[in-house]
Image (tube, helix red, strand yellow):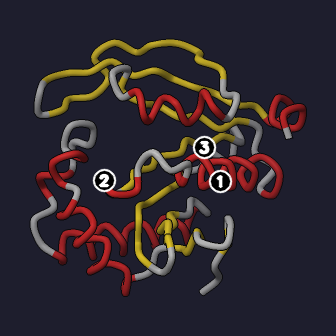
Amino acid sequence: MFTYPLDDHIELKPLALQHARPLFILTNRSRDTLREWLPWVDAITEVEHTASFVRNAVKQGAENGAISAGIWVDGELAGLISFHEISWHNRSVSIGYWLGQEYVGQGIMSSACRAFVDYALMDLDLNRVEIRCATGNQRSRAIPERLGFVLEGIVREAERLPQGYVNHAIYGMTQSDWKLLR
């Protein structure tokens, strides 16, 4: 299994089944903060639920190239970043991500997203990367804004969370824009 170092302390590793237990533990430890923005959190109540997610992510990666990677900080799993299914016809993909509560606010996710965007647009030669975030999720929205994404619009009541429906901000980056920003 390859690792992709982001700096001396942070690396990305493709998800593998042996990551199910540490991923479940991280999810469980961060459950209260994750639940505010991620609708799947309360359905993950045992390691097998996480193992099922990992198996599906590995399968999707093999079939579509849409990789999911653990974000590791000093050897500890800190979060996850994923390509959702790649549209090879449209040469586009969206990115999803989250960090455990003790890792937020340190620039970790910005570095991971920068690497994923660069891989998508330069190595995979995709034309577009999209990031969708709940409009109220300021930490998540700061990442595409920091990376130079364009806010392309707001989709009303796009996702149902425990507290009700939330609007999504849609951010986009094209290959031509990314080349200018690099």
Compared with residue 149, is residue 92 higher up or lower down, i.e. above or below?
Answer: below
Badge 2 vs badge 3, beta-carbon distance below 8 Å: no
Quote the CA–CA distance across marks 2 and 3. 26 Å
What amino acid is labelled 2 in the image? Gln
What is the quadrant of the N terminus in the image? bottom right
Residue 158 image point, x, y percent: 32, 22
Compared with residue 46, is residue 138 higher up or lower down, i.e. above or below?
Answer: above
Residue at left offset 45%, top offset 45% = 105
Query: Which residue is at the far right?
Result: 180
Badge 1 vs badge 3, beta-carbon distance below 8 Å: no
- Dot 1: what SS? helix
Residue at left offset 61%, top offset 63% = 65
Q: Badge 1 local density, few (<14 within 10 Å), some, or many (20+)?
A: many
**Quadrant of the rendered image containing residue 147:** top right
Residue that label 2 marks: 101
Q: Nearer the viewer, mark 2 or mark 3?
A: 2
Mark 1 / mark 3, whichever is N-terminal: 3
Count of marks, rendered view: 3
Residue 4 image point, x, y percent: 67, 72
Residue that label 3 marks: 93
Residue at left offset 22%, top offset 72% = 25
Mark 2 / mark 1, whichever is N-terminal: 2
What amino acid is labelled 3 in the image? Val
Residue that label 1 marks: 116
Tell whether 36 sits left or right of 176.
left
What amino acid is labelled 1 in the image? Phe
Quote the CA–CA distance across marks 2 and 1. 21 Å
Mark 2 / mark 3, whichever is N-terminal: 3
Tell whether 167 sits left or right of 92.
left
Q: Nearer the viewer, mark 2 or mark 1?
A: 2
Badge 2 vs badge 1, beta-carbon distance below 8 Å: no
